[in-house]
Amino acid sequence: MHKMLAQISQHQPDIPFVIHDWSGESKQYGAGPPRFILRIHTPQALKSILRNADLGFGEAFMAGDIEVEGDLQALLAWQETPVFTQLDFSLAEKIRFVISTLLTRNTVEQVKNNVHHHYDLGNDFYQLWLDKSMTYTCAYFRHPDDSLDQAQWNKHDHICRKLRLQPGQTLVDVGCGWGAMLFHAAEHHDVIATGYTISQAQHDWLQAKIKERGMVGRVHVKLKDYREIDEQYDRFVSIGMAEQIGQKYIDTYFQAVKKMLKPDGVGLLHTIGAPIPVPTNPWMEKYIFPGGYIPSLGELVDSMGRFNLVPTDIEDLRLHYSQTIDCWYRRFDAHEAEIEAMYDQRFIRMWRLYLNSVAYAFRHGRGRLYQLAFTNGLNNDQPRTRAFIYDQKLEEAPLFTNDGYSYPPQMP
């Protein structure tokens, strides 16, 4: 173990750390005050990490068999070192994941089960730490000190500008979540907005909010999978849903988009992505997003081309996403006692690891957040520059103040 840790320290000399094991022995690696202390409580926890890398670490962390004092994201930087990435899975785990891959088919029914696993944890849970609009996707920080509420407002308006929404147009939002994009587009751009979700909790929430906000007839929500949509719309948007499709269904997805978007119509895909195709993190797939797959930019663009969906603008908002997750983490941490009462301490540890892992991935790793604007077929009625996205004044933008949570985020 000490040889491996010394090699990790050599690759990351700016991250000194201390290891404290079950025997009471402590050893520091690197010079200067440690960024974190890793406490390994059992030899079995160490064996699990060495045998199964990310999965072993994640399961030991959830069980409390290892603890991290200090900057958890500094420890997660180990994932970028050759020493850690070369750790292999045991034969049993390899067989289990092969079987899992073969049996995982993101059919309409299976996707509903996957969505239920993550998004139906309870509206009360998500209300504790999301912004007021209940937006569970990357925000857009026009200014570094924007509050989370302001940044989510900015994001929805940024997308509306890219879609060039006009009054009276129809907009479809596939994977609409709790409806923030639908309400923003209808209220500020006077379109008829229809959202599709396969989460019963989100659908019921939206039905009530449509009535509460007086948007009946202007905002609609339907409980349907994207493969079941047979209507056509002027504009298409999908925010944070493409990650749930699965690698084998990327063509199926864009074929459905082609069908629901009118000829010459404008669409926008907002999705987590990767610079190149990479395997799904086994811990994340098992515990956080079953059936998920992070597509590479090349996979998305290639598939779009097969259906004559023409990209017109591509933007990477990865640093906006790391800042968004920092905001979520502060809020999650502030409500730990309430969340533990809903679930348990194992759930708290699981979500701490999840939020810190993805924040690190977008700030320092392979995480990307792509916004791809496109048209259905060649459409020459397009602006020649990107000025139309930025030159308008945010006359209707609310000025949300700082959300009151501590800066910078305090990691466990």
Image (cartoon, rainbow, N blue to C red):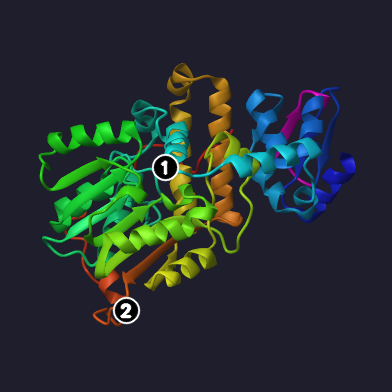
User: Which numbered disc covers residue 378?
Assistant: 2
Q: Nearer the viewer, residue 250 or 166?
A: 250
Q: Residues within 10 Å of mark 1 (few under 14, many from 20)?
A: some
Residue 327 visible, this orientation: yes
Q: Name the residue under label 1.
A: 108
Q: Vertical placement of 197 versus 259: above or below?
A: above
Residue 18 visible, this orientation: no
| Left or right of 302 in this view: 174 | left
Residue furthest right in the image: 3
Give me the C-alpha separation between circle 2 and circle 1. Answer: 31 Å
Q: Quadrant of residue 202?
A: top left
Q: Which residue is drawn at 72% across and 52% down?
A: 14
Q: Which residue is drawn at 53% across and 37% down?
A: 288
* Earlier-in-chain disc, 2 versus 1: 1
Q: Which residue is drawn at 44% across and 29% down?
A: 334
| Residue type highlighted by circle 1 | Val
User: Which numbered disc covers residue 316?
Assistant: none
Q: In which quarter of the image is residue 123?
A: top left
Q: Percent from the top left, x then y, of residue 216? A: 11, 41
| Left or right of 344 in this view: 116 | left
Q: Quadrant of the C terminus?
A: top right
Q: Which residue is drawn at 43% across and 26% down?
A: 335
Identify the magenta region: 31-43
Q: Percent from the top left, x then y, of residue 4? A: 85, 45
Q: Which of 374 and 187 is in front in this view?
A: 374
298 within the magenta span = no
